[in-house]
Image: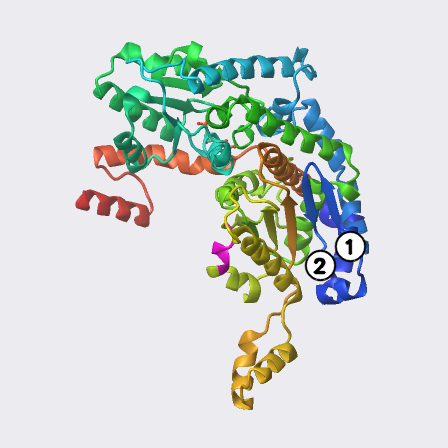
Amino acid sequence: MSDLINSAAWKALQSHYKEISNVHMRDLFAADSERFSKFSVNDCGCLLDYSKNRITEDTMVKLFELASSVDIAGEAKRMFAGERINATEDRSVLHTALRMPKGSTLEVDGEDLVAQVHEVSDHAATFVDKVRNKVWTGYTGKPIDTIVNIGIGGSDLGPLMVCEALKPWQQKDLTFHFVSNVDGSHIAQVIENVNMQSTLFIIASKTFTTLETLANASSAREAFLNSGAATKDIAKHFVAVSTNSEAVAEFGIDVDNMFRFWDWVGGRYSLWSSIGLSIRLSIGNENFDALLDGAHQMDRHFVETEYEKNMPVILALLGVWYGNFFNARSHAIEPYDQYLHRFPAYLQQLDMESNGKHVRADGTAVDYATGPVIWGEPGTNGQHAFFQLIHQGTDLIPADFIAPVKSQNQIGEHHNMLLANFLAQTEALMKGKTLSEVESELRASGADAKTIASLAPHKVFEGNRPTNTLMFDELTPATLGSLIALYEHKVFAQGKIWGVNSFDQWGVELGKQLAATLLQELQSQKVGEHDSSTAGLLGYCFTRA
Ligand code: G6Q
């Protein structure tokens, strides 16, 4: 049995779970009018209300003991100081250094990383100003009006999500496209619709070896040259964001037009680095700095605040409470803000790639559940689709509800309607509706006894379904920065509780290896050594091609 399962803190939670598993939140609220003030935190421009959870003060004490027992605070300090906590890749994990203000210092192995960060971000900022101010022009002298970011995974999801979230801040005369999928249809749709003379391609790849990105970049370069441009014109239309200058040069991009970063920035934690070049181009340098500052405020909150008021730690502990004690296997993310429509997809990678692990950092197998399935869609759309299952399905699905108090688009009563739904959902999930409430409602509507008996069971809501509510005044660059960093640190804290390395991703390698062999077989039309399913499917491709 693992140390975690054997720990006093874990055992205390196990026995506490038995006491609380049948307690209804409706009763907890009825018994304590101070629940909201007891179980909410307000910092970094965000309000976290976690009172609609299946917890008492005693539960939280026990959860905070768990946090202390695995020393989340100490582990966070080690990460922030640049210790090589990503042991399987022998790397530090320092996305937090990317948000440290100019003038501060962080010395790691004798080098001041903050100075390096700001040197690179000044390089990016100068380039961004030139493009946005129409000083940087294409090879025929036309200003750039279209930006195409080519990248995948961490080099796509973060920049795309942030550009979408901050659309109101986007420079109006620039159009943005994000190409990630190796499916040729993705790049084809973009190539068809852009004017090459005024398009800038950003090839975003930390390693500059990623199959999908290199294939899309090559096709973009080919289309550019086929449009009448010469090889020397590539320098005005292709820039790279990478740690691999040799591969960038080999691809044909001038290394003066390469924005570098470092191996201590993990892919899914890289939007704050040069990988965020498309974000800078969209919202401008000042707003990008505000995004960084929002994240930095959350970094400080995470390392400086006691567990009892620490938002990432609280979210992490509640996730463990449901995942490991209530056996909840998924966690929904419900942003009630259309601009955050890619936020659940972004968090899927952040959380599932970080904590979807079956061994601990020391290589031993876990004997408890680790990261849950993360999913979600913006409200209110989700209400008309899958919320049925969250309200009345057989699984317990904890959910985070996220909304701004003010909309970026005050049109009529839209935002009040949005907020009314937002608030109604968490209230309904918490309270539910009892059989007797349903029966009296039906009676009041004039239903007869037979109808009441047959309909009532379908209309009962158990309730007692947990939610966290996150609110902020407005979705601004700063609040978005804080929100993203909040989830980054939540994922870190959970990883520490489970003892996994949240910063590697070996689980994506096997498929890549097999794909390399299968690509050769598809090209040569020869079936190699495979199971009968894979061989049969290859054969099907050959006969239908
Ligand atoms: C993220 C992963 C992964 C990575 C992509 C793209 O943490 O490492 O999603 O970002 O595979 O990698 P490149 O940026 O090297 O092309």
Secondary structure of the residue carrying numbered label 1: helix
Amino acid type at image mark 2: Arg
Callout 2: 10 Å neighbours few (<14), some, many (20+)? many
What residue sits right under mark 1 in the picture? 59
Report the quarter where the C terminus lies: top left
- The residue at label 2 has a CB less than 8 Å from ligand 1: no
Indicate which disc, 2 or 1, sits on the residue closer to the N terminus: 2
Q: In front: 484, or 477?
A: 477
What residue sits right under mark 2 in the picture? 54
**Count of numbered tags:** 2
Amino acid type at image mark 1: Thr
Residue 382 in the magenta stretch? The answer is yes
Residue 238 in the magenta stretch? The answer is no
Specify the color scheme: rainbow
- Residue 156: horizontal and vertical position, in percent? 45, 32
Q: Are marks 2 and 1 in contact (CB under 8 Å)?
A: yes
**Residue located at (50% from left, 48% from top):** 411
Callout 1: 10 Å neighbours few (<14), some, many (20+)? some
- Residue 492: horizontal and vertical position, in percent? 65, 37
- 459 left or right, relative to 47: left
Secondary structure of the residue carrying numbered label 2: loop
**Residue located at (21% from left, 21% from top):** 226
- Residue 281: horizontal and vertical position, in percent? 46, 24
**Residue located at (71% from left, 32% from top):** 76
Q: Is residue 392 visible?
A: yes
Q: Which residues are magenta?
A: 378-383
For residue 229, above or below residue 542? above
- 543 left or right, relative to 231: left
